[in-house]
């Protein structure tokens, strides 16, 4: 079993989040001049330079502020005519903390609209790497050693993205997932944000969060960590929600929801499955599918190798609607395995 971090990184921290919103769709020069006076970080920048930094953004957001900082900032911003939203952040929401020098650190805080918050991080010291997974439901973060070869692969993948040159993504929205990245390599540190990146909008941000997410998906062992990763999968545009376990019998886990947009990926998964191999389909984390996918599941069930389905209530109902016999559906894992073993080969 993976070790739990006794001093979790990411850790937890309380504080205030403050949003300063522009009066119109974009920051005006007058507002930029006011913002330069309110935020010390912009004190030595030109008014046009401040405006350019926030082009296409609806406002400025500060996080993990003390109560006094929040009060002072809110008063100054409201006095300048801005609308201000101040919210106390949950003390149990994981937050990234840089480890002591000279460790290399790549981390992301994940704040989905309708799921628990969490964080993923990697820490590399010399030849040793550690993956950290934290979420609101984990009393302590899970820490997992990263195999050396996998660690080198991850670092090469991240280096190809030039993450220390990345800045805040200009894409914003209401729902989806907010990401806060924090990095350190050698003596350089970087922090930036993104909202629901994908391969077309903010592709480098998307590739960076996927590199962390896929590493976590491969190495996570704690049940709560796995549940958290499955829960955020759909927010990250991470492809078909599937995991294949080379066990005996072979187990294919489909989780989350499937729409007609999953058709091509689902066809590829089914086509890549050896037809003669006995198969346990794990749908205990399934959240439903579009009815247009029913024929694909029905055809797949007819494969010669034998297939049983380990299901939850939603999966059982939809698979029966798709025409899969109720005798092939099991809510108990051991009964499902026994039924598969009893089938003639």
Image: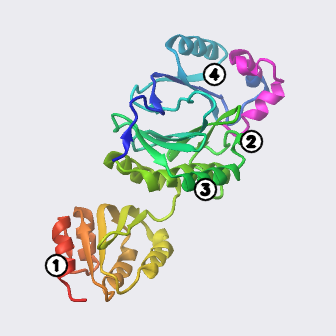
| Precedes in sequence: disc 3 or disc 2 | 3
Displayed quadrant of residue 280: bottom left
Q: Secondary structure at mark 3?
A: helix
Residue 120 drawn at (x, y percent): 49, 42
Label 1 near label 2: C-beta < 8 Å? no
Q: Nearer the viewer, mark 1 or mark 3?
A: 3
- Residue picked out by circle 4: 82
Q: Secondary structure at mark 2?
A: helix
| Precedes in sequence: disc 2 or disc 4 | 4
Report crowding for label 1: few under 14, some 14 to 19, many 20 or more residues within 10 A (C-alpha): few
What range of the chain is rendered magenta? 33-57
Apparent side of residue 120 relative to residue 72 in the rendered image (left or right): left
Residue visible at 61% across and 56% down in the picture: 153
- Residue picked out by circle 3: 153
Apparent side of residue 111 relative to residue 205 in the rendered image (left or right): left
| Precedes in sequence: disc 2 or disc 1 | 2
Give the Cα distance between marks 4 and 1: 63 Å
Report crowding for label 2: few under 14, some 14 to 19, many 20 or more residues within 10 A (C-alpha): few
Relative to 257, is 225 above or below?
above
Relative to 137, is 63 above or below?
above
Q: Secondary structure at mark 1?
A: helix
Label 2 near label 3: C-beta < 8 Å? no
Majority secondary structure of magenta residues: helix
Q: Nearer the viewer, mark 2 or mark 4?
A: 2
Q: Nearer the viewer, mark 4 or mark 1?
A: 1
Tell me, yes or no, if residue 334 can be seen here: yes
Give the Cα distance between marks 2 and 1: 56 Å
Tell me, yes or no, if residue 331 can be seen here: no
Relative to 45, is 342 above or below?
below
- Residue picked out by circle 1: 327
- Residue picked out by circle 2: 165
């Amino acid at each position: 079993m993976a070790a739990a971090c006794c001093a979790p990184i990411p850790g937890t921290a309380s504080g205030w989040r403050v949003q300063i919103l522009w009066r119109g769709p974009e920051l005006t020069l007058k507002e930029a001049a006011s913002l330069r006076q309110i935020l010390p970080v912009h004190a030595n920048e030109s008014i046009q330079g401040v405006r350019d930094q926030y082009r296409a953004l609806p406002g400025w957001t500060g996080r993990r502020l003390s109560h006094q900082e929040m009060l002072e900032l809110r008063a100054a911003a409201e006095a300048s005519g801005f609308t201000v939203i101040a919210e106390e952040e949950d003390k149990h929401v994981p937050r990234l903390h840089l480890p002591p020098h000279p460790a290399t650190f790549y981390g992301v805080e994940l704040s989905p609209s309708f799921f628990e918050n969490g964080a993923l991080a990697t820490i590399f010291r010399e030849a040793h790497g550690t993956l950290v997974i934290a979420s609101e439901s984990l009393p302590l973060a899970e820490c997992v050693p990263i195999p050396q070869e996998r660690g080198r692969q991850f670092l090469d993948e991240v280096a190809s993205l030039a993450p220390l040159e990345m800045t805040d993504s200009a894409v914003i929205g209401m729902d989806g997932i907010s990401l806060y990245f924090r990095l350190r390599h050698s003596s350089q540190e970087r922090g930036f944000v993104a909202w629901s990146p994908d391969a077309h909008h903010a592709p480098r941000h998307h590739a960076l969060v996927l590199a962390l997410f896929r590493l976590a998906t491969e190495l996570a062992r704690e049940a709560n960590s796995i549940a958290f990763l499955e829960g955020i999968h759909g927010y990250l545009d991470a492809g078909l929600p599937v995991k294949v376990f080379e066990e005996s019998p072979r187990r294919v886990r489909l989780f989350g929801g499937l729409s007609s947009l999953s058709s091509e990926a689902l066809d590829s998964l089914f086509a890549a499955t050896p037809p003669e191999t006995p198969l346990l389909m794990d749908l205990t984390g399934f959240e439903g599918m579009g009815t247009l996918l029913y024929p694909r599941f029905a055809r797949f069930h007819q494969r010669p190798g034998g297939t049983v389905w380990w299901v939850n209530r939603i999966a059982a109902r939809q698979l029966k609607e798709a025409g899969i016999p109720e005798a092939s559906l099991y809510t108990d894992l051991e009964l499902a395995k026994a039924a598969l073993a009893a089938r003639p080969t």
